[in-house]
């Protein structure tokens, strides 16, 4: 009988270590910081981990020492318990706490420190994100499921929810903040490296909670300004053939598209839908095929989604709508 | 009249330090929350709130240190070794003194930890 070859000893722990270490980088890792806040948090993590490791090694060393050595005077033992068991742990814990508190003012928008330019309002809904940019010169841009930030500039985020509790977290850029119905929480972020980062909803919010994510794109400041200026105007492709179908099939009851009659506010704003990287809040690449699939049967892609299925529309209409939406850049 | 109270045999002295800790905790969190919620209507700065917390902390630490000293005296200034588990009045007294002393130490550290955020946080979060 053939016996399955046993892996050499150590291969499984090594594989496990590789899997674990793979989590230390990537576009959704708090340890691969691309923002000032995330860098502080990563630093805090390493200081705490190192502090914990040193304490653990000390305790284990003491344990081995106690197990091996035979005789101790009672006075020496009492002294060791007092200093090693009470005074030292208290001092270490107070020290680590003080370090964490010392980092804290940089992680939250305290008072005037965050008196900045750009403000982004993000509102969580089951299962997508409304994003409104308010620039200091009065430009307002509405978008969804993607936020863009200028690298090197502090951005203040106002976080709200209009149904259940969601949580906003872009691990590569900063800490986590809940979005609570009836209240506005604030978070400030400063991206330090251009790139695209992923932010999952971090609080269970319903059936498709795991299918609710957003992309955060950090752009060089000039590119960001150009992008925002372009977003403030209707897409050049808005007048094409799909616009009439969009109106006729009633899509405008829920969705808004700048430059058309569509002013709906129940669903995501689609004014520049084609320029987004993903479809359906971070779960599919933004391609014409995927848009078609989503229009025809959104519930299949995202169970529990509020958008009804439009599979009864003529196949050709869905195709035209999808390619029109894809071109709204 | 004497300034330092006579040793008394009651369980209540055990609770002095935890009660001071609780009162200090309530004061610090209460004053910071109320101030930050109503800072437009209150004419003082956050620095004044932090000074208030610092003052309360000093008072709390002095009270806890006093409670610890009384407990230390009750324990006989360390002249006897624990565990004090004989069923005698003397051992009961020593045990209670020792327990109060340890509890006071815990509360002393806890009060410092409660006050620490006011050292580093200089403004209300918006």
Image: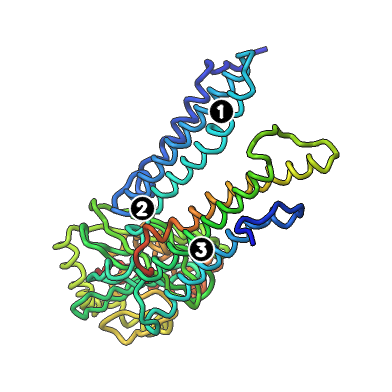
Mark 1 crowdedness (10 Å alpha carbons): few <14, some 14-19, many ≥20: few
Q: Quadrant of residue A238?
A: bottom left
**Under tag 1, what secondary structure?**
helix
Mark 2 crowdedness (10 Å alpha carbons): few <14, some 14-19, many ≥20: some
Check whether the beta carbons of the residues at disc 1 and disc 3 lie within 8 A of each other. no
Task: Give residue A216's position: percent from left, percent from top.
Answer: 32, 59
How far apart are the two marked residues, 2 and 3, measured between alpha carbons?
A: 42 Å
Q: Mark 3 belongs to which subunit? A: A
Task: Give residue A214's position: percent from left, percent from top.
Answer: 39, 61
In the rendered image, the quadrant that contains the N terminus of chain A is top right
Q: Which of marks 1 and 3 is in front?
A: 1
Q: Nearer the viewer, mark 2 or mark 3?
A: 2
The disc, 1 or 3, on the residue closer to the chain's N-terminal end is 1
**Under tag 2, what secondary structure?**
helix
Q: Can residue A304 be seen in this view?
A: yes
Position of A247 relative to B1 (above/below): below
What residue sits right under mark 2 in the picture? A102
Task: Give residue A31's position: percent from left, percent from top.
Answer: 37, 44
What residue sits right under mark 1 in the picture? A80
Q: Mark 1 belongs to which subunit? A: A
How far apart are the two marked residues, 2 and 1, measured between alpha carbons?
A: 31 Å
The front one of A110 and B70 is B70
How far apart are the two marked residues, 1 and 3, measured between alpha carbons?
A: 60 Å
In the rendered image, the quadrant that contains the C terminus of chain A is bottom left
Q: Which mark is residue A302?
A: 3
Q: Mark 2 belongs to which subunit? A: A
**Under tag 3, what secondary structure?**
loop
Mark 2 and mark 3, same subunit? yes
Residue at the (76%, 36%) spot, across then down: B84
Position of A277 relative to A269 (above/below): above
């Amino acid at each position: 009988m053939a016996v399955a070859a046993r892996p050499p000893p150590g291969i499984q722990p090594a594989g496990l270590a590789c899997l674990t270490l793979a989590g230390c980088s990537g576009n959704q890792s708090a340890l691969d910081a691309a923002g000032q806040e995330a860098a502080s948090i990563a630093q805090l993590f390493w200081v705490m981990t190192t502090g914990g490791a040193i304490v653990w090694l000390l305790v284990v060393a003491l344990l081995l020492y106690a197990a091996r050595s035979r005789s101790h005077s009672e006075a020496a033992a009492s002294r060791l318990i007092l200093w090693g068991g009470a005074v030292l742990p208290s001092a270490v814990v107070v020290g680590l706490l003080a370090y964490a508190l010392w980092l804290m003012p940089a992680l939250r928008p305290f008072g005037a420190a965050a008196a900045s330019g750009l403000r982004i309002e993000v509102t969580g809904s089951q299962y997508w994100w409304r994003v409104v940019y308010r620039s200091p010169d009065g430009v307002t841009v509405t978008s969804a499921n993607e936020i863009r930030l200028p690298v090197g500039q502090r951005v203040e985020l106002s976080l709200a929810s209009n149904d259940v509790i969601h949580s906003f977290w872009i691990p590569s850029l900063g800490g986590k903040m809940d979005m609570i119905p009836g209240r506005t929480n604030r978070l400030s972020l400063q991206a330090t490296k251009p790139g695209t980062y992923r932010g999952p909803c971090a609080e269970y919010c319903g059936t498709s909670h795991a299918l609710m994510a957003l992309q955060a794109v950090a752009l060089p400041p000039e590119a960001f300004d150009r992008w925002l200026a372009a977003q403030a105007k209707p897409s050049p492709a808005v007048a094409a053939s799909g616009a009439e179908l969009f109106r006729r099939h009633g899509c405008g009851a829920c969705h808004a598209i700048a430059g058309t009659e569509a002013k709906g506010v129940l669903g995501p704003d689609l004014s520049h839908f084609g320029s987004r990287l993903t479809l359906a809040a971070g779960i599919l690449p933004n391609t014409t095929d995927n848009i078609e699939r989503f229009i025809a049967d959104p519930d299949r892609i995202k169970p529990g989604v509020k958008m009804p299925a439009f599979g009864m529309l003529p196949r050709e209409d869905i195709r035209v709508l999808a390619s029109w939406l894809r071109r709204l850049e | 009249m004497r300034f330092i109270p006579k040793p008394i045999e009651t369980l209540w002295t055990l609770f002095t330090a935890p009660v001071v800790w609780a009162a200090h905790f309530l004061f610090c969190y209460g004053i910071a929350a109320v101030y930050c919620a109503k800072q437009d209507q209150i004419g003082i700065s956050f620095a004044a709130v932090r000074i208030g917390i610092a003052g309360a902390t000093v008072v709390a630490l002095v009270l806890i240190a006093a409670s610890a000293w009384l407990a230390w005296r009750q324990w006989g200034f360390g002249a006897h070794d624990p565990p004090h588990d004989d069923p005698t009045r003397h051992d009961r007294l020593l045990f209670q003194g020792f327990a109060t002393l340890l509890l006071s130490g815990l509360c002393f550290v806890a009060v410092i930890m409660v006050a620490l955020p006011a050292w580093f946080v200089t403004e209300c979060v918006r």
